[in-house]
Image (cartoon, grey):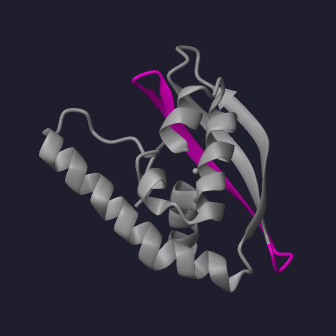
Amino acid sequence: MKKLFGLLVLVSFMGLLVTSCTSSSPGDAFKNYMELVKKKDYKTLAQGFAIDESQTPEQQAQATEMIEGLLTEKADKAIAEKGGLKDVQVLEEKISEDGNTADLKVKLIYGNGTEDETAQQMVKQNDQWKMVFKK
C-alpha cells in the first residue's frame, strides 16, 4: 500500500505542459499536476514526470506510456476508493542551491475526509518542474 501511495503522489498524482511551464515554483507545478489527477487526465500527467534524457526518444516515449498506464490502472482506483482528490497543500518546499531540484512535503486531502502527508522530489528539466518517479 505504501508503494501505491508513493505512486499516487508521484503520479499523485495535472493543461500540464502549458500550466507547468508557467509555474514559478516546484510547489505550484505539483499543485497543477494534482489538478490533472482530479480531471483524470493521466496522459497529460504522465508528461509531468522527469524522464532520463540520455535515453532515445523511443525509450522516453515508452517510459511515459508506462507511467500513464500505472496511473490509469492503479492510482485512479486508489484515489477513487478515497472519494477522489479534494485538495492539495504544499506544507514545505526546499529548493537546492543550484535551483534544479526540490523536495516537497505535501498533504493530499481526499473526498472521504482522509489525509496523507508525503514527500515528493521535483527536478527541473527544460525549464519545467517535473516530478521524480518513485518505484
Q: Is residue 113 magenta?
A: yes
**Residue lying at 68% horizontally and 45% vertically, measured from the top left:** 31
**Residue lying at 66% horizontally and 85% vertically, measured from the top left:** 81
The quadrant the C terminus occupies is bottom left
The quadrant the N terminus occupies is bottom right
Task: Using the image as rendered, state which of residue 10 and residue 62 is in the foreground.
Answer: 62
Residue at the bottom extreme?
81
Task: Using the image as rendered, state which of residue 48 and residue 9 is in the foreground.
Answer: 48
The answer to whether 117 appears left or right of 7 in the picture is right
Task: Using the image as rendered, state which of residue 95 and residue 44 is in the foreground.
Answer: 44
Residue at the top extreme?
98
User: Does residue 133 lie above or below 77 as drawn?
Assistant: above
Prevailing secondary structure class for the magenta stretch in the rendered image: strand
The answer to whether 42 appears left or right of 113 in the picture is left
User: Does residue 100 lie above or below 16 as drawn?
Assistant: above
The answer to whether 21 appears left or right of 32 in the picture is left
**Residue lying at 42% horizontally and 58% vertically, measured from the top left:** 43
Find the magenta span and give its range: 111-130
User: Does residue 41 lie above or below 90 as drawn?
Assistant: below
Q: Quadrant of residue 39?
A: bottom right
The answer to whether 32 appears left or right of 101 in the picture is right
Task: Using the image as rendered, state which of residue 32 and residue 74 is in the foreground.
Answer: 32
